[in-house]
Amino acid sequence: QVQLVESGGGLVQAGGSLRLSCAASGRTFSSYTMGWFRQAPGKEREFVVGAWSSGNTYYADSVKGRFTISRDNTKNTVYLQMNSLKPEDTADYYCAARNSGTIITDARSYPYWGQGTQVTVSS
């Protein structure tokens, strides 16, 4: 069982930056694939970025070049650095973890989820 707790959301102006954190419980954090997803009001949850245990990453086109995922296995924490934020980035952001699966963008493959943190980007 893995428990995930996100933090770092808030209100920021367009063009600004935020860093989200996701702290995980468990002794096998380094072996998990970690993902960030987001859900805007009235929209479906969408994939943002994923990081395999190998360190390889995969970004959604909408955030590529602006967002960066990183993980600190010594702290059991994954981060999402968000730069050049746009109003369309406004959403609840969720951290997710899995230890198996093939399609990193598939939310259904992640059994563990955090409670979410709200990000609001004003224009």
Image: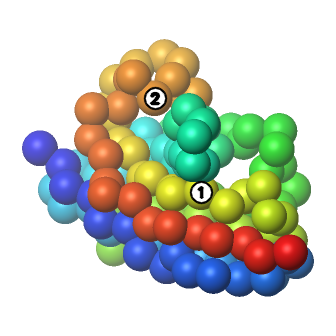
CA gap between label 1 and label 2 equals 16 Å
Q: Check disc 1 and report its element: helix, strand or loop.
A: strand
- Residues 60 and 74: in front is 60
Q: Which amino acid does the dot numbered 1 rest on?
A: Ala
Q: Residues within 10 Å of mark 1 (few under 14, many from 20)?
A: many
Q: Quadrant of the C terminus?
A: bottom right
Instruction: Tell us which disc is closer to us: 1 or 2.
Output: 1
Q: Is residue 23 above or below residue 2?
A: below
Q: Callout 2, which amino acid? A: Ala
* Residue placed under numbered mark 2 in the picture: 107
The picture places residue 121, in percent across and down from the top left corner, at 73, 72
Tell me what residue is drawn at x 19 percent, y 55 percent: 3
Q: Which residue, as the protein is rendered here, is positioned at the far left?
A: 1
Which residue occupies 57% across, 40% down? 42
- For residue 123, side relative to residue 53 (left or right): right
Which badge, 1 or 2, is on the more N-terminal residue? 1
Q: Is residue 29 above or below residue 42?
A: below
Q: Residue furthest front?
A: 42
On screen, residue 11 above or below 54: below
Residue 92 locus on image (x, y percent): 51, 57
Name the residue carrying label 1: 91
Residue 109 position by quadrant: top left
Does residue 36 appear to the left or right of 101 in the view shown?
Answer: right
